Image: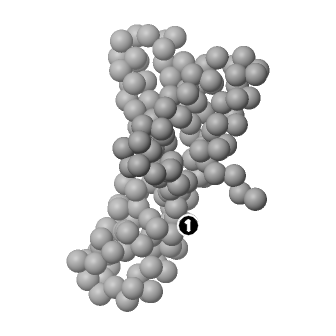
Amino acid sequence: MNISLKDRIMADMKSAMKNKKISELQALKLVYAECKNKEIELKTDLNDAQMIALLKKQVKQYEESIGQYEKGGRADSVREQKERLALIKSYLPKPLSDEELKTLIEETIDTLEVTSVKQMGSIIKTVQSRTAGSADNQRLVELVKERLKTI
């Protein structure tokens, strides 16, 4: 049986509590609170795809915080934020390589019988649905643009 991402985070939160891993527990509590807020907003439980989107948003926030702390010369906070960032990233699917993305893009272009650059949106949407959150969207857009230059 596959355990949902949300359940995995909850189990890890309980484990961190038992093992007195304070920093890990705080990071997981923030993730879980964000998840609960989103569920209240949507009036439904989050599925794994929605959880991945939520985690990616938090990764971005941590990266911005790290940049701010580095500018402020706060090494202790930078270290703490990087630990939390690594923890959150551990729940995300392994990112696809450029080669894997290019292969998916080619398959999608063949399947959709793409004939013009105007179909870029449908290519991106199809590839995103097939990657289930494991593709860097910015990189995906760049590779699709690059590939469509040859059409």
Which residue type does callout 1 highlight? Glu
Q: Residue at x 44, y 86 (%)?
A: 110
Badge 1: residue crowd in 10 Å (few <14, some 14–19, many ≥20): few
Which residue appears farthest toward the left when viewing the image? 118
Seen in the picture, residue 4 relative to 19 is either above or below; the reply is below
Horizontally, residue 130 falls left or right of residue 1, namely left
Side of 20 relative to 104 (left or right): right
x, y (%) of residue 27?
A: 55, 26
Q: Nearer the viewer, residue 139 or 83?
A: 83
Q: Pinpoint residue 78: horizontal percent, then vertical percent.
A: 48, 18
Q: Residue 144, how many percent across, how many down?
A: 36, 69
Provide residue 108's location: percent of width, then percent of height: 45, 79
Q: Tell me the quarter of the picture where residue 54 sits.
A: top left
What residue lies at 44% left-to-right and 65% top-to-bottom?
128
The residue indicated by pointer 1 is 100
Vertical relation: 81 (above or below) 124 = above
Q: Quadrant of the C terminus?
A: bottom left
Residue lying farthest to the front in this orientation:
43
